Every structure is written in C-alpha cells, then in structure tokens.
Amino acid sequence: MLVKHGKGGEPVQRVVVDPEVPRDVAELFRRNGPLLYRLRTARPPRGQDDPRIPGVLIGIFGGTVALAAGGLFALGAPLSAAVLLLTPLIGLYLFILGVVYLVRKPSPADSVERILYAHARHWQGRFLILEDFDHNARHLLGRVQRAIDFVVHSRVNAMGMLDSVRNSVMLPAEEWEIARLLTKLSVLRAKHHNLARGGRSPEVVAAMAPLERALAASEAAVLARVEALERYAGHVADAERALRAQGQIEVLRAHLPEYEQLVAETGAARFSGPEIGHLSDDADMLRRALRESVRSAHEAFRHLDG
C-alpha cells in the first residue's frame, strides 16, 4: 500500500479535504498540514496583501509632510514658497515609496504561507488536519486512508476491472464523511472525559449512562463504515493477487513448447504429461478466481455505496 510511515511504523495521515474544494487547493492543503496548523494557531502572515500596509504608508507620508511644512513655516517661508518646495518633495517621496513597495519580493516560503492562509480562510471548515482528531480517531483515519490508497493505486482499478470512475468520486467523499464524524467524536469524547473528572456520584453516573451509550453506538457506527471500506480493499487485494498469479502462469505457458520439446527429446514424456497439464488447469482456476474477486469487490462497493 502506498502509505508513508513515521517513527515506530505509525501511518502518517494526510489532511482530509471536502471533495467540493478545487483539486489544486486540496493538494496545497495536503502538502502543508503542519503549516496549516501553525496558521490556525498563529497571527496572520505578513506580506504584500497585509491590510496594514496602506495605513502605515499613509501615516509615514502624512507625518513627513507635516514635519516638512512645519519646518518651512518656522523659517518664515511664505505659503507659495512652501507649496513650491513641498510639491517636488512629495512627488519624490511617493515615487520612492512606490518603488520600494513594488520591488519588495517576499520569499517563496512567505508566498506559500500567504496563499495557504488566504485559501484556509476561504475554505474554513472544509478541511481537517491531524490536530482535529484524538488518538483513537487518528488510528481509524489511518485505516481509512490505507484502504482507499490501496484501492485507488491497485492494478485492477487502473485496468478498469473496478468502477474506477465511481471510485474516484465515492471514495474521497467517504473519506471526508468518516473524517468529519471522527472529529465530532473526538470533541464529544473530550467533553465527556471532562464531565467525568473529579469523581461521579451515583446520580451523575445514572444521568451519564444514556450519553455513554449514545457515544458508544456512534463509535460503533463509524467503525462499521471503516470496516466496510477495509472489506472492499480486501476484495481488491484478492483480485490483485489473482491477477498477479495469472500473469505469472501465462508467462509459464508461453514457455511450455520449449519444455514439451525438451521432454520429447529426452524421452521423459511419461513423467511430464500430467504435471505440465496442470498449467492449463491452474490458469483456468486463476481466471475464475480473478472474476470471483472482482465480482466480490463490486458487491462490496455496492454495499459501501448503499
């Protein structure tokens, strides 16, 4: 399976994005999970689109003009002379500010950060990062993403033996829906844990019992969806194994005439007939196994989709 692992063999979960988010933005989110977390918890990045910049420039400009005008009048210059002297000064000052403002180039990291921040604000609530999940939810999310990655990158899917079009639409939607439910479970588990702190009287235990049952039922329902995805991936894995074995058998069958000729020339025909004949039987059996695996995968998909 095409899944990255971190220290200790734990899967590295990717950012989960609502399928409605444009693909290029979704890929940007997935590539920058840690940065998304920093942007969520830190101040907005500064850059050319920082709304404070125009105000700062106006303030500097106004202060400079006021100081220059005050100095001229203090020296006894008439109003007309002050205007004549200030006009080129103002023009030069604005020109320098404009050049500095336009020439300033943020670093590539700043650019990515600002672009990411803008998209994160626009698509707020339409993506989920690792910190949105508690430990149990992260584990289930890893199982979901491993199953989806295996199906999407399988040979049988690439060869069109599965419904690759529906896979490309339904599997991301299922990942998003499960992830969304896992974040809700994470929040409720944290609240439930806080409510249970400091000991509980029998009355509180009785009052919380229905809530605990509701939480457990919801956890079981989400787990069932995860397991359904894994069953689908399991059928795809069976089809992958059958396809790979079928290919190997077909390679062996392609060389069969060479073996038959060797057997005939060496006079060992009485030993080879039944054994070599098994190749055809094995190939037929694998073709049937492949068809059955693909059929089972389609049935699991329909169950998952339903």
Image (tube, helix red, strand yellow):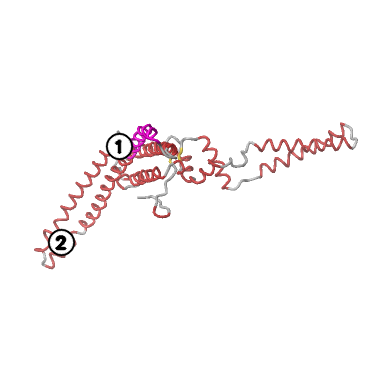
Q: Position of residue 108 (x, y in %)?
A: 57, 47
* Image quadrant assignment for residue 160: top left
Label for residue 304?
Answer: 1
**Is residue 203 on the magenta stretch?**
yes
Give the amino acid type for the residue marked by disc 1 in the picture: Leu
| Residue occupying the point 11% across, 66% down | 268
Label 2 close to label 1 by CB (< 8 Å): no
190 vs 151, nearest the viewer: 190
State the residue in front, 37 or 121.
37
* Residue 110 image offset from top left, x and y in percent: 58, 45
Q: Is residue 136 magenta?
A: no
- Label 1, secondary structure: give it: helix
Q: Residues within 10 Å of mark 1 (few under 14, many from 20)?
A: some
Density class for disc 2 (Cα within 10 Å; few <14, some 14-19, many ≥20) is some
Is residue 194 toward the left or the right of residue 149 in the image? right
The quarter in which the C terminus is drawn is top left
In the rendered structure, which segment of residues is drawn in magenta?
201-224
The earlier-in-sequence mark between 2 and 1 is 2
- Residue 136 in percent (x, y) is at 39, 44
Q: Which mark is residue 260?
A: 2
Disc 2 and disc 1: Cα gap in Å? 48 Å
Mark 2: amino acid:
Glu
The disc at residue 20 is none
Residue 36, position in %: x, y? 51, 43
Q: Is residue 75 left or right of residue 36?
A: right
Which residue ends up furthest to the right in the rendered image? 76
Name the dominant secondary structure of the magenta segment. Answer: helix
Decide which of 280, 215 is in the foreground and name it. 215
Q: Quadrant of residue 144?
A: top left
> What is the secondary structure assignment of the residue under circle 2?
helix
Left or right relative to 217: residue 125: right
